[in-house]
Every structure is written in C-alpha cells, then in structure tokens.
Amino acid sequence: MTSTLGRAGRSASPRRVSIAAFGVALVTLTACGHRAPTSAPDSPGGAGGPGAPGPAPFTVGGQLAAVAAASATRAWAVGSTANINPLAVGWDGASWRVRLPAPGGDKLTSPGGGSFAGIAAASGSDAWAVGSGQYGLPLIEHWNGASWKATSRGFPADAMPHAVAATSARNAWAVGAIGSRPLIAHWDGTSWRRFPSPTPVGTSSALDSVAAVGAGDAWAVGRTYTARGPIPLIERWDGTSWREVPGPRIPGGMLAGVTATSGRDVWAVGSSDSNRAIIEHWDGTSWTLSASPRTGLAAGLNAVAATSATNAWAVGWTLSPGSFRTLIERWNGARWTSVHSPAPGMLTGVAATSGTNAWAVGFWTATGIAVVERWNGAHWT
C-alpha cells in the first residue's frame, strides 16, 4: 500500500506557503491544504541542538513537496526547482539523484514551468507523479523503471491533481479539484477516467490526499468550504462508487493527509483555524479523533504514513517562541508521541516501508535548498 501527499495550484482557496525537504529547505509555492501561521518566523530555533544533522548528503536547489517509497532501496521525492520547473529526485539505496525536466533527457514534459504536488509508487518500476504543468494544465508523469513519460490520456484537461496513490500497474487514483468541485480520476492500465465524486454541501470542495488498500478500497480526504469556514471532507471507494463518509465535524478544520494499512486501519491528519493538529482514525466502523501531543504555541499536520497497526508517522509544523520548526509524531499502537526532528521549517510529505525506514520532506524559507530527513530506526537525520 502506498500513501502520498502533495498539492499545488488551482484549488478552492489555495494557500501560499513554502515547502522543503530532507533537513532544511526551499522557496515558495502555491499549495493547497497545507497551513502555516501567517507570522511564523523563519528562525533556526535551536537547529544546532541535540540530534541536529551534520552536512547534508544530498542538496538540490528548489523544493520538494511529496515523497513515496517502494522499498528501502527505491524512493522518489517531487516538487519544483528554484525557477519553478517540475523536479523529481530518486533514491537508489545509496544516494539521491536529480532527474531534471529536460527535453531529450528524462523527458519530463513540462520544461516551461510548473511543479509536482504528489507522488506514489506501486513498485520500483511503477510510479506516478502529478501536479501542475505549463499553462496550468495538469501534469501527469509515469515512471516505468527507466524514464519518466507523460501519461495523461483521458485525464480532464481542466482538472488540477493534488495527490496520487497506486497499488498496481492497473490501479492508481489521482485526486484534487476541478473548478470548485472535488476531482477523482482512475488509471486502469490504459487510460485515466474521471469518476463521479459526492458533492458536499458548501461553496467549494477539494481533495488533497488519497490512499488505496487495493482495487476495491480507497480513501480521499480534503476540505469543504461553507459559509462558516472550512470543514473536513472524507470520501471512500468501495469498489463500485465513491461516497462521502461522515467524520468528526471540526469547525475550521481541513484534512491534508491520509494513509491506510487495511479497511479497518486508516489515519487522516490535518489542522484547524485554531492552529491545532488534527488526527483521526477509522476502525472499520467510524471515524474518531485521536489525541495529538500539544507542541508549542501552534501546530499542524500535513501528511501521514503507516506500515502496520502499530507503526505510523505524521509530519507537519510547530511554532514555539522564536522558532518555526518541523514536527514529527509517531503512533506506536497505543498513542501518538512527538519525535525529535532536526530541521527548522515545515514537513509536507512522509513515506515509510518499515519500522526502520521512513522519509520525510518539507521546507524552510531561509534557504533555497531542498533536503530530506530519514528515519533509520533510532532517530531522524
């Protein structure tokens, strides 16, 4: 099962934030679903304390918005370069390598501008990256094990994908927005096809994350805007159709990430207008709120990944006096706890393959360098 997060571009009420990855981070991009306090200082805030990272083993100019891992030796992170072109980097088990969108090179097909917002991997030779391309058109790329190739056949031209999930070569879901309505599209191995999405009551809605357990079970989360502000939106695929599933009705809340290990174990995370993190859990019957550790003056979660019922990660940001720092929380089967994160800034994506291998990507606006944090089973570096 692969769960990813990422969003950028034309959606209902997009928010302007910054994004980075692997330890420090990046520049500014239009992202939907991510929240940050408007007055958060970009200060190192103690980055040199215990557990602070040494020289980064990998740096690249620009920003990374999402990450996906097929195994301990194969992962991808996507975003945009410093001059706002799509950016994809790959992990081969030993190092990260940059795959720039250059005509005749890696054949990423939007050299004229744009950014990736989401990434998913079904295997080492089957991955998807989605986002906004040249002229604001949807950008859909597929990795076949050797190169990236534009694969947008059947995808609505006026849609904006925010995230993607894949379980096999014939089963991938992309979600986002199409105008003021939620977008859901499916890849069946040949082409993309738009699926009807429930129409929530509100002025506009968008989906910002998607997770798939198999061909007959998938989840998508986001937000619906009402006259009183946003509320969380949750939808589920049952193998036949998508339907809205009621969850905790949190005023001013929105969900930015979702992950699933089974039909009875699903996590969704987000934030609220009160600058508090939201964590919700599906147990096969209903959604309930789960306690998030209170960290700093304010906090929010942007992404979540799980490998089992006793191992899940959620990432985002926390604000303390004088510092705006990355936030990492871990589920151990009983409760969520905060885990030290070495980077200042904000984390926007997380992926995990086991209890000893996980990646997180995010941002820090003080630099223009995208970096990545890794969990080795003992600590994040």
Image: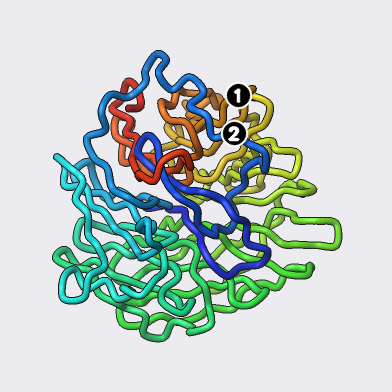
Sequence order check: which comes first, mark 2 or mark 1?
2
Q: Regarding mark 2 in the picture, which secondary structure is present there?
A: loop
Question: Which residue is at the front of the view, 33 or 123?
Answer: 33
Question: Which residue is at the front of the view, 271 or 362?
Answer: 362
**Position in image of residue 43 (x %, y %):** 52, 29
- Who's the residue at 49% across and 33% down the image? 326
Q: Which mark is residue 368?
A: none
Q: Regarding mark 1 in the picture, which secondary structure is present there?
A: loop
**Position in image of residue 80 (x %, y %):** 38, 59
Is disc 2 surrounded by few (<14), some (14 to 19) or many (20+) residues within 10 Å? Answer: some
**Position in image of residue 235 (x %, y %):** 61, 62
Answer yes or no: is residue 339 visible. Answer: yes
Kind of residue indicated by mark 1: Gly
Is disc 1 surrounded by few (<14), some (14 to 19) or many (20+) residues within 10 Å? Answer: few
Above or below residue 250? Residue 344 is above
Kind of residue indicated by mark 2: Pro
**Position in image of residue 175 (x %, y %):** 51, 67
Residue pointed to by mark 2:
41
- Who's the residue at 35% across and 27% down the image? 380
Q: Going by the image, does 319 lie left or right of 44?
A: right
Question: Which residue is at the front of the view, 179 or 282?
Answer: 179
Answer yes or no: is residue 350 visible. Answer: no
Q: In which quarter of the image is residue 372?
A: top left
What is the C-alpha distance between the residues marked 2 and 1?
7 Å
Q: Do the residues labelled 2 and 1 touch (CB within 8 Å)?
A: yes
Residue pointed to by mark 1:
322
- Who's the residue at 50% across and 51% down the image? 263
Image quarter (top left, top right, bottom left or bottom right) of the C terminus: top left
Q: Going by the image, does 265 lie left or right of 52?
A: right
- Who's the residue at 71% across and 55% down the image? 246
